[in-house]
Structure formats: C-alpha cells, structure tokens
Image (tube, rainbow, N blue to C red):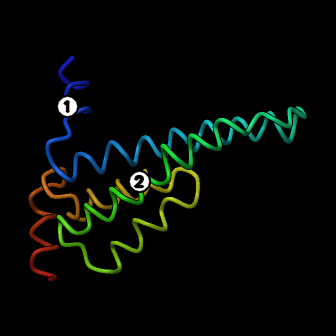
Amino acid sequence: MGAMTNFFDLSTPAKRFRLVAIWEAVTWLALLIAMFFKWVLGYEEAIAIPGMVHGVAGFIPFVLVALLTAWSLKWDLKTTFLALVSSVPPFGTIVFERWAVRTGRLAELSAPESREKVDTAA
C-alpha cells in the first residue's frame, strides 16, 4: 500500500505533474481504443465520450499543470515547450516525464546528481 500512497502524494509540483502526465496518457489510451472501435469495427459513436474525457479531463489539465510546474520549478522556455508538445502524441507525456526526471527537471523526483547538472547549467 505504500507505493500506491506515494503515487497519489500531490504535495509538490513535480508529484502533481507526474500524476497528471500519467492520467493524460491513460485518457489517450482510452481514445485510441475508441478509435479502433470507430474506424475498424464501425461504431461511429465510439469516440464521443473518450474524446471528451481526453480533452476535458486529460489534455486541458495537463497543459495547466505543465504551465504551473514550469513556473514553480523555473523551467526554461525549451523545457516548457517540450512539456506542452509532449501532450500531442500518444504517451508523449510519459516520455517527457521520464526525461524530466532523468535530467533533473522534476525536483525531488530526480536523482541528486542530475539536479546538480541542471543547477550548474543555468
């Protein structure tokens, strides 16, 4: 239960960003499944609800949280741009989040040595 508790810990901007990035990817997956039902199986109405959920509960919150995280963690324009663009391709938010952790851009979620590289580069 400890790992699940840590997953829902939203006490910092980096932790909130991680949760919303994963949620955005989950809504993308639901939309992709719905697209299969529409385009392959012919269910025209299949994307109505997953499309709306992805837009309203996945994409928009991700963009807002990405901007708030960029401000809180003082990301440069390049990092902020990459975060925003990561919401366009399916699962791009997960790729960006992993990269941001690895390169020290997600504060306490990143290893101490990668945080030092970002601090000295600034």
Within the image, what quadrant is residue 37 found in?
Answer: top right
- List the residue tagged with mark 1: 6
Which secondary structure lies at badge 2? helix
Spatial CA span between label 2 and label 1: 20 Å
Question: x%, y% of residue 43?
Answer: 86, 32
Within the image, what quadrant is residue 99 found in?
Answer: bottom left
Residue sitting nearer the eye, 18 or 71: 71
Within the image, what quadrant is residue 105 found in?
Answer: bottom left
Q: Considering the image in quadrants, where does the N terminus appear?
A: top left
Decide if residue 38 is on the left or right side of residue 4: right
Q: Considering the image in quadrants, where does the C terminus appear?
A: bottom left
Disc 2 residue type? Phe
Disc 1 residue type? Asn
Which secondary structure lies at badge 1? helix
Question: x%, y% of residue 98?
Answer: 35, 54
| Residue at the right extreme, as displayed | 42
The reply to whether the C-beta atoms of the residues labelled 2 and 1 are less than 8 Å apart is: no
Residue found at x 44% / y 66%: 84
Residue found at x 52% / y 50%: 91
Residue sitting nearer the eye, 72 or 115: 72
Q: Earlier in the sequence, mark 2 or mark 1?
A: 1
Vertically, is 8 above or below 52? above
Decide if residue 52 is on the left or right side of residue 105: right
Residue found at x 26% / y 56%: 101
Count of picture labels: 2
Crowding near the residue tagged with mark 2, few <14, some 14–19, many ≥20 C-alpha atoms within 10 Å? many
- List the residue tagged with mark 2: 62
Decide if residue 18 is on the left or right side of residue 33: left
Question: x%, y% of residue 103?
Answer: 25, 65
Residue found at x 17% / y 65%: 73
